[in-house]
């Protein structure tokens, strides 16, 4: 074929066969006899405006979805094959996730207006080109973080964000629920986490950070809402990984329950923060605090079935531990020489708590300071050296470096984008990223689970601003973590991107238009 079909991320293998296309019209049906595929079938049927059936009609005219275990042995559970001809469309997946990803490729083979008008987008119908696709992801962790602590998003906005991730075959949604500026998840045993810690009186203003607005800000998700989001994401084969910060970034929690902090440190006075910085509050290593954390994680585990639980672990200031006689006595009794080792003690204890319940801890690369807990995975954000060291030590890593995956950093100038932090991160720079460093020896490549794009929301109060920063850079990252590196081509990506941006227009995604 002369050029790749406009699918992002680019499939491993894609061949236009030159035959007659398959027409989709009002009498087309989606066939999915397997109960595990009903969710995918119903979602696709809703987009196309057609019906779901257990078997094809006598004349064919069907889009058939099925799981093929033999294909799974070849391509894995997330792999799929899509074939289309005049006689019909078949999507076979190595598992239900593979079928879902095949359905996302089918969407992108159709005109963008399908997202708004279904099969009627073409007047009398739309056509699927005669094609053969064989596809599988490069990495198992293809993620994005959404910060709802600095600025809260209601459930409908969270679901919309997940929808756009799923279109890109992204499969991890890290939900940053807890930070100094707000606690966003209901914990029934500790109601003040939401009655107190979820609300701040005002917020520093974008571009004028020494002044504050007069608008109280807050919100939280009830446990029923959390269950709803988790189930919604699961229907789209997105795993929700909650982030509950330990031991730092705890100002909001300690405002609600100050007794769990270093109460005997001079000047101890936690408050819910209304500005963007690193703050001294940390949990104190004492029995009441540890019981509080155990109780919190017990309720969190009941809500989130994810294998991984993110515990933050980053930017924990050591000042209050060093100033607290109680914590100093604890350090002496446990032979901990400094604050780094106190932080490591917290992480190891939390890792043991999670492991005993069949879960795995993941945290930012600071959890490696003072010694990395044996079963922990690490998310590298500051420097690739932390990932290389952790992988060589036998730990799984997820790449999330500021250099390529922090999408609060501007693509244009700060003036163009309403103020921002960090350095300029262009679309081409994101696309050039390889999660596997050339410095990492091949025997450790399997330790790199994938990569993740971060949307920190200090300066993004609305979902529209989040989308404007995220896309299309997150589209580029989706191709980084899915497509074999030897098949990547930025010029071809830009060509295909024009079709995806037209689809965003129909879906109401507020992307930033790349420069020509």
Image (cartoon, grey):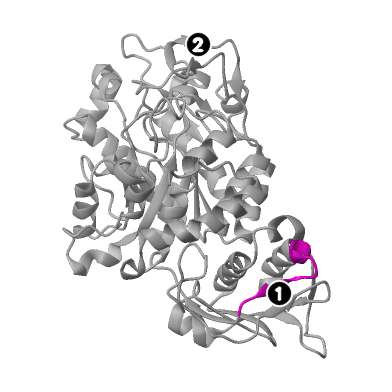
Highlighted range, magenta: 118-129
Horizontal side of 302 relative to 363 (left or right) equals right
In the rendered structure, does residue 196 fall within the stretch colored magenta? no
Q: Is the residue marked by circle 1 packed among few (<14), some (14-19), or many (20+) residues within 10 Å?
A: few
Would residue 466 be visible to someone looking at this image?
yes
Residue positioned 49% across, 33% down in the render: 178
Please state which of residues 105 and 242 is positioned toward the viewer in this rendering.
105
Q: Is the residue marked by circle 2 packed among few (<14), some (14-19), or many (20+) residues within 10 Å?
A: some
Estimate the x, y position of residue 285 in percent, counting from the top left. Answer: 34, 30
Residue positioned 25% across, 65% down in the render: 445
Estimate the x, y position of residue 168 in percent, counting from the top left. Answer: 52, 58
Horizontal side of 38 relative to 372 (left or right) equals right
Q: Which mark, residue 211? A: none
Please state which of residues 188 and 117 is positioned toward the viewer in this rendering.
117
Q: Relative to residue 7, is residue 127 depicted above or below?
A: below
Would residue 358 be visible to someone looking at this image?
no
Horizontal side of 214 relative to 366 (left or right) equals right
The residue that mark 1 highlights is 35
Residue positioned 39% across, 35% down in the render: 412
Estimate the x, y position of residue 399 in percent, counting from the top left. Answer: 32, 51
The residue that mark 2 highlights is 212
Of label 2 and label 1, which has the lower sequence position?
1
- Spatial CA distance of label 2 from label 1 is 53 Å
Please state which of residues 402 and 331 is positioned toward the viewer in this rendering.
402
Between marks 2 and 1 in the image, the one whose residue lies nearer the viewer: 2
Q: Relative to residue 460, is residue 504 depicted above or below?
A: below
Q: Relative to residue 9, is residue 311 depicted above or below?
A: above
In the rendered structure, does residue 123 fall within the stretch colored magenta? yes
Query: SS for tag 2?
Result: strand
Q: Relative to residue 307, is residue 4 depicted above or below?
A: below
């Amino acid at each position: 074929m002369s050029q790749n079909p406009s699918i992002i991320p680019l499939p491993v293998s894609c061949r236009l066969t030159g035959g007659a296309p398959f027409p989709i019209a009002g009498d087309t049906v989606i066939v999915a006899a397997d109960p595990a595929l009903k969710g995918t079938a119903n979602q696709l049927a809703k987009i196309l405006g057609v019906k779901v059936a257990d078997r094809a009609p006598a004349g064919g005219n069907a889009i058939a979805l099925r799981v093929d275990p033999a294909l799974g042995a070849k391509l894995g559970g997330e792999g799929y094959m899509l074939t289309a001809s005049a006689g019909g469309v078949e999507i076979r997946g190595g598992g239900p996730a593979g079928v879902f990803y095949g359905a996302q490729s089918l969407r992108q083979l159709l005109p963008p207006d399908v997202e708004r008008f279904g099969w009627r987008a073409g007047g009398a119908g739309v056509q699927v080109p005669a094609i053969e696709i064989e596809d599988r992801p490069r990495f198992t962790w293809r993620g994005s973080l959404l910060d709802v602590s600095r600025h809260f998003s209601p459930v409908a906005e969270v679901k919309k964000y997940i929808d756009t991730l799923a279109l890109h075959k992204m499969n991890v949604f890290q939900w940053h629920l807890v930070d100094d500026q707000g606690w966003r998840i209901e914990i029934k045993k500790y109601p003040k986490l939401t009655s107190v810690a979820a609300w701040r009186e005002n917020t520093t203003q974008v571009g004028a950070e020494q002044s504050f607005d007069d608008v109280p800000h807050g919100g939280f998700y009830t446990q029923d809402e959390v269950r709803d989001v988790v189930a919604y994401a699961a229907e789209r084969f997105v795993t929700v990984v909650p982030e509950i910060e330990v031991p730092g970034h705890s100002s909001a929690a300690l405002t609600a329950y100050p007794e769990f902090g270093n109460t005997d440190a001079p000047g101890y006075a936690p408050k819910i923060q209304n500005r963007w910085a690193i703050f001294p509050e940390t949990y104190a290593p004492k029995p009441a605090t540890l019981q509080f954390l155990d109780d919190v994680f017990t309720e969190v585990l009941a809500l989130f079935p994810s294998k991984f639980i993110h515990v933050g672990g980053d930017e924990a200031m050591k000042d209050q531990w060093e100033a607290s006689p109680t914590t100093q006595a604890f350090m002496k009794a446990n032979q901990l020489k400094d604050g780094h080792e106190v932080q490591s003690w917290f992480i190891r204890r939390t890792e043991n708590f999670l492991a005993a319940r069949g879960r795995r801890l993941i945290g930012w690369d600071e959890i490696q300071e003072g010694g990395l807990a044996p079963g922990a995975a690490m998310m590298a954000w500051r420097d690739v050296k932390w990932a290389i060291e952790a992988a060589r030590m036998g730990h799984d890593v997820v790449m999330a470096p500021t250099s390529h995956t922090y999408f609060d950093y501007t693509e244009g100038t700060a003036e163009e984008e309403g103020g921002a932090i960090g350095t300029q991160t262009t679309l081409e720079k994101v696309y050039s990223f390889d999660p596997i460093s050339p410095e990492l020896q091949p025997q450790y490549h399997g330790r790199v689970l994938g990569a993740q794009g971060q949307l920190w929301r200090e300066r993004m109060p609305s979902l529209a601003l989040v989308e404007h920063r995220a896309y299309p850079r997150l589209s580029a990252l989706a191709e980084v973590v899915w497509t074999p590196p030897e098949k990547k081509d930025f010029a071809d990506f830009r060509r295909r991107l024009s079709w995806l941006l037209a689809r965003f227009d129909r879906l109401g995604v507020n992307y930033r238009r790349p420069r020509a």
